[in-house]
Image (cartoon, grey):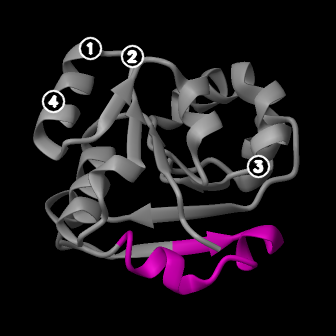
Amino acid sequence: MTLKRIGFIGGGNMARSLIGGLVAAGTPPDIVKASDPEKTIRASLASDFGIETTGDNAEILEASDVLVLAVKPQVIEKVLTPLSSSFDAHKPLVISVAAGIPIASIEKWANTDLAVIRVMPNTPALIGAGAAGLFANPDGHLWNSVLLQNPLSSR
């Protein structure tokens, strides 16, 4: 499989760290895209990393082979529910960094079965020096671990 586009929903500290790691590791910025409701965050991500940004989460979902959910746990349901009608058509690999949110909840709010991998990075990951625990559902296990190891590695 050829990785075409990595989308981030949420542009805060964790997304910034992961995007920075991707770009520093040689991922072309033109395959990375992020959404955030805050215009200043979008502008900062675009300026710092050369990626495309938007305020439209549906646009990110529709354009992504890998969708990273980098939002606070308390807003993830609010983010996913409006997108539920689009998940069946696009079926990206979903990577969630939202602490404490079970895969079953992500699938429920997306209203479909998905390949989901939960990533639990630790605080030093914000400066490119951390570690992360990974857990995948059965569909998520179909993805090669190398796919995740390189894009999520520290800078």
**Mark 2, other Cα within 10 Å: few <14 / some 14–19 / many ≥20:** some
Could you give the CA–CA distance between mark 4 and mark 2, rounded to whole angstroms? 13 Å
Please say whether residue 148 is one of the residues in the magenta stretch.
Answer: yes
Residue at the location (68% across, 71% down)? 136
Query: Is tag 3's residue or tag 2's residue first in the polypeptide sequence?
Result: 2
Which residue has dot 3 on it? 91
- Report which quarter residue 142 is drawn in: bottom right
Seen from the viewer's position, the closer of residues 36 and 73 is 36
Relative side of 29 to 91, left or right: left
Which residue has dot 2 on it? 37
Q: Amino acid at mark 4?
A: Ser
Residue at the location (19% across, 65% down)? 124
Instruction: Decide: is 38 above or below 101.
Output: above
Q: Secondary structure at mark 3?
A: loop
Residue 39 marker: 1
Could you give the CA–CA distance between mark 2 and mark 1, rounded to whole angstroms? 6 Å
Q: Residue 88 placed where, x, y %?
A: 85, 40
> From which residue to which does the magenta span run?
134-152
Q: Amino acid at mark 3?
A: Lys
